[in-house]
Image: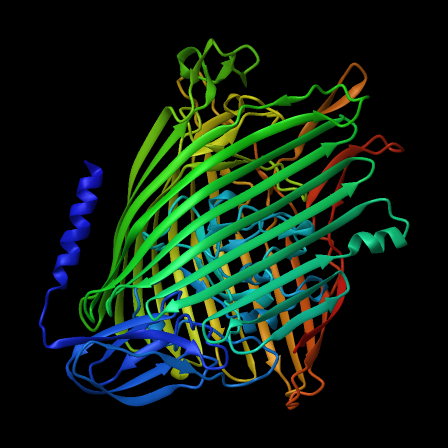
Amino acid sequence: MRYKILYTLLFTTISFGAYSQEKVTLSGTITMKANTETVIGASIFIPEAKVSAISNAYGFYAVTVPKGEYTIVISCIGFESIEEPISLKQNTRRNFSMSEKSKTLDEVVIRHNKAASNIRTPEMSVNKLSISTIKKMPAVMGEVDILKAILQLPGVSTSQEGATGFNVRGGSVDGNLILLDEAVVYNTSHLFGFFSVFNADVIKVMKLYKGGIPATFGGRTSSVLDIYQKEGNNQEYHLTGGIGAISSRLLAEGPIVKDKSSFVIAGRTSYAHLLMKLADNPNSVSFYDLNAKLNYTLNDNNRIFLSAYFGKDKMDFSNFFNNTYGNAFFNLRWNHIFSEKRFSNASFIYSKYDYGLKIKYVGIDWASDIRNYNFKYNFNHHLSDKLVLNYGLNSIYYQFNPGTIKPMDEKSPINADQIEKKYAWENALYISAEQKITDKISLNYGLRYSYFQRLGEQQVNNYAHNQAVIFNPQLQIYEEGTPMSTTYYGKNKKIIDFGNLEPRLAVSYSINDDQSLKASYNRMSQYIHLISNTASVSPLDIWAPSDQYLQPEILDQVALGYFRNFSQGRYSLETEVFYKKIKNKADYIDGAELIAHKAIEQVLLNGEARAYGLELMLKKNTGKLTGWLSYTLSRAEQRTPGRNATEPGINNGQWYRANYDKTHNLSLTGAYQLTKKWSFGGAFTYQTGKAATYPIGKYEYQGITIANYGERNINSLPAYHHLDVSATFTPKPYSKKRWKGEWVFSIYNVYARNNAASLMFEQNRETGLSEAKRISIFGIIPGVTYNFKF
């Protein structure tokens, strides 16, 4: 019935497209003149009709106007604007090529539009950063890092130094949907968080949605990070790369068939493990990754893309553990233009994330992975100059391997075992509309229906009263339940299913050309979960599907914002307040053991979470000095009450701070172009210390001193702050030679702040007193990198 309602809504809305035949549509593709790379986010404006459009993720645009003579203006920061007369007497296909403003080593700046356009669009809680801006920011070891740039934005933080992933508006790491060329990336970090998996040389554009998320996206409850790779130069061959203190990278691109197809391939590798060997350090850390993309233009209406990524991290601490993890994906895409008004993209995607851990003193060799097979079919439909539809479907089949267990050697007491694999299927239909109601009011609204099935082949435990966790009233603790029986479900047999309607709405009211008020609401459902109770540099990563015990998370979020441009767009101000609440937030019982657990539901309880706060961002957009100040005041909390009157729940059923709660988050980022040869960058970050639980006492048992802990997360680690700086030197900025080079000098943590990743409580052997020791990961880290382009 729900499918029928959505189909009816879809086709009824499309039927609204019948309007005056006196109007015609201009459509086409915006590309770069030098290499025919598509331009994302270019502004197409027809001033006489006061009609505008933005090129989509594949460079396609469409505008509808009455028949007549017009002027078309196409602009995008980093490119020379195009302005020329155009006669529109019938539906017209017209492609445009834009020239870059400069031919320096910096990447092309790709941003949404002129600052004024952000005032009128209903899009809010969205941040876009150009690759050139990111390249001016200092980073660890001189390596450009997209995720480090994201952490400078309001509402975005990390739970601690060296932690994997990032947190958005008080959400968990697994609540972020991270897409690279539409494929899911499950782990974003390399080398203790030193680097991200995103090689900036091959990245074309990135966009972070914190709220007001379009109906196109689903499956997560925190944010969407949407990243696209470059397509490759189809005119000539180029090499781009860099040589750094810890890692090096190389990118090659060029035509396969000139004007029709091209390739880009990029690789990175680290050699820290070699330096450790030279220093007689028995430990070893290393990573590598490889990006590739091919595209072929069949004709004016059809284009095919093939994208791929492979990455792997290896950490070997000789006396303790060995850890490996990595992402991989393939994506075959087909772009098709049906008409001047309708564009489609079909994607066939395979993604995998695998994780391995060998604990030497236990003798266990443990591995897990998650795989998905994903089909997407999306349509852009330009019904008129005031109404644009986006609709489609998404189907994902999951395979979960919670754990393959092996003994490390013949001396190991561990027996080989395989935790039962799990399977699931997630489907969704969606439709959204961007509509201009008046000159002052614009809407973006939509509906997504998601349907999730947990499938066999698997033995499912059955528990008394359907409770996998039981409460021990004598000890006043939660314990693992004992299955009463099991039920076997054959291959692809349905174990349980869930369905959810997810409405989305965003509205913009333009006070004038420089000021606007915006509001948004979105509901989202998350059916897969990262089972992890640590944010350490070697986290335990187990992904699990929803079932009758681990319920799907349901998010409701509202936001209200005020946006203003000053001095003709030289400065801009963005302020937002938000409130979000999540049902069925998983929580862990005290003492939960996750490694090789065959019934993870026995250590999990379902609770709820909430987050609320204020975000502020003040930007200087032009001039020699550019940058921004961002500040977030927020609270992220969690609560797991008892299931009945006799149970206390977690933390006595009271709200407590989430592990990733940061009350204050302040960032100051700047870039200064001194001369054509020298430019400088700096970034200062201050965050309130993350929530922590300190011992409130101790007792002795059989001669062993044992710490006694109080309520969860009522304490805080010391405040986290550091200053990073960089300087870029371009020896020959005016050289017309094909070889261009630059030196990047950077210092991470200039004043050598020992930020606490955690505190270790122990007894001083000499005094017998208890003391806390700060465990830090990073100190001051200088770096130098030589970048080149040929």
Residue 463 on image: x %, y % = 45, 13
Compared with 282, 14 (above or below) is: below
Residue 767 on image: x %, y % = 87, 33
Along the line of sight, which residue is nearer the eye, 298 or 566? 298
Side (left or right) of 316 relative to 98:
right
| Quarter placement of the N terminus | top left
* Residue plotted at (68% across, 64% down): 249
The answer to whether one can see residue 437 in this image is yes
* Residue plotted at (76% across, 28% down): 408
Compared with 362, 434 (above or below) is: below
Side (left or right) of 172 relative to 555:
right
Q: How many marks?
A: 0
| Quarter placement of the C terminus | bottom right
* Residue plotted at (48% across, 37% down): 529
Instruction: Choose top left, top right, bottom left or bottom right for residue 219.
Output: top left
Instruction: Choose top left, top right, bottom left or bottom right for residue 358.
Output: top right
Residue 783 on image: x %, y % = 75, 66
Instruction: Choose top left, top right, bottom left or bottom right for residue 696.
Output: top right
The answer to whether one can see residue 220 in this image is no
Compared with 727, 599 (above or below) is: above
Along the line of sight, which residue is nearer the eye, 88 or 716? 88
Side (left or right) of 760 relative to 607:
right
Side (left or right) of 120 relative to 662:
left
Along the line of sight, which residue is nearer the eye, 55 or 471? 55
Compared with 521, 500 (above or below) is: above
By what rule are the colours in the image chosen? rainbow
Residue 316 on image: x %, y % = 77, 42
Along the line of sight, which residue is nearer the eye, 571 or 493? 493
